[in-house]
Image (cartoon, grey):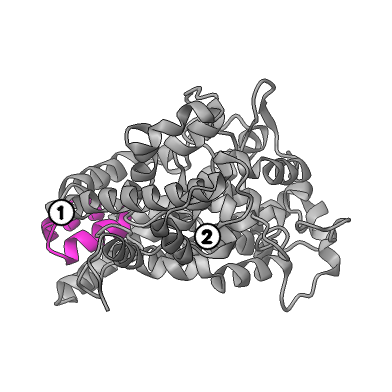
Amino acid sequence: MNWEQLLSLKRFGDTQKRPRATQDETRLGFDVDFDRIIFSSAFRSLQDKTQVIPLSETDFVHTRLTHSLEVSVVGRTLGRRVGKVLLERHPNLVDLGYTFNDFGAITAAASVMHDIGNPPFGHSGEKAIGEYFKTGKGVKYKDQLSDVEYQDIIDFEGNANGFKILTESREGISGGLRLSYATLGAFIKYPKESLPKNPTNHIVDKKYGFFQSEKTAFLEVVEDLGMKQKSTSAISFYRHPLAYLVEAADDICYTIIDFEDGINLGLIDEEFALEYLIKLVKDTIDSKKYHSLKHKTDRVSYLRALAIGVLINEAVDIFLENEVAILNGTFEKSLLDKCKYEAQINDIIKISVEKIYNSTEVVEKEIAGYRIIADLLDVFVTALNNKFNGTTSNFDELVLNLLPEEYQTDLDNLYNRIMQVCSYVSRMSDSYAIRMHKKMTGNIVS
């Protein structure tokens, strides 16, 4: 892979390249990407989607929205720091007009939308959709779908759903948000289809990155970017290099900030912050300043900021040390999996799993989310199928009045009907899904 091709400003529908030198320096194409994401309805719904604590009654806890904004800030710094060195290594990029801000803008845009495809109720929402079709009432559709279509559904993946949201065409709107291919490439953490499932030690094989409904769009993006093909027997590619920085920004934020949330909510003792975070920042901490802070939130915030700074430095160094391997597709781990603080990071995650992710409050609300999502899928999929078969009941007609028109198109194919409903439910916020479920089950609310 080469950087000139990887930094493509091309968008869906373009008939020719967009040279970097012709860009308006006051608002680059990569900045336009960020703006389009921020103004999208899918991004706005993140303000009421679970990050760690579902439906928290406090105003402190992070949502997907605040998490995504923080990840974009870290991503921008990572991109700029890496870009500055890459321009020294590849002076031809300077001749073409690229600056270190381009790397920062691409990484920030991909980072701010990294969770845009996540359903309500956190990662349990993904599992709830999959299990409805794998072990719930939706299993009856298995024999009517191809193997790869069924795998898309039973292994519903937020990353692939995000690519769908960003690129899906609607009547009068071609190419979704029409983002630059460089930004889309940096967004795709797992550039492969759902089958075959061939687990390997390479990070790209951990999950998948697109549904069959977006296969054409995916291939257009990766081919324009010159992303290296990993397999000749299946659709599988190595990552766009900047996807490693997007992943690192997310890893840094959820590791440190989820931990901070747990401490401030009282789920994790402050002593754990001292024990684990100080291991990360022992070389940068100002002990006098730390001990002058009188409030727990201020002390934890100070340690959090230092820890993020330390991990940013680590991620930048590891990326630059392994640039050639990353471009060749032979760098198999995430950046933080290669850092010298891996043990400390794993310790923090272990505590977070025990004290936060498996807490009674989280588990109880995830259980409720399973039921809500399964019921909504059942009602809408049944209604759409009955519409296609010409057997709609009065109830189905009422249900379809609640389903926006854009999700009632292209009904001739069962896979597309199911994906329409999954897409609609996945875009619901936590609270909206609860309200919709109450109405569907007869619990009328004002």
The quarter in which the N terminus is drawn is top right
Is residue 293 shown above or below 361?
below
Q: Nearer the viewer, residue 254 or 372?
A: 372
What is the chief secondary structure element of the magenta stretch?
Answer: helix
Whether the magenta-drawn stretch holds residue 105 is answered as no
Q: Which residue is mark 2?
A: 113
Q: Is residue 202 visible?
A: no
The kind of residue tagged 2 is Met
Instruction: Using the image, tell me which numbered label, if any, was put on residue 173.
Output: none
Whether the magenta-drawn stretch holds residue 268 is answered as yes
Relative horizontal placement of residue 405, taking residue 393 as reference (left or right): right
Q: Nearer the viewer, residue 424 or 381?
A: 381
The kind of residue tagged 1 is Phe
Q: Which residue is mark 1?
A: 272
CA–CA distance between discs 1 and 2? 31 Å
Crowd around label 2: few <14 · some 14–19 · many ≥20 (10 Å): many
Q: Which residues are magenta?
A: 255-279
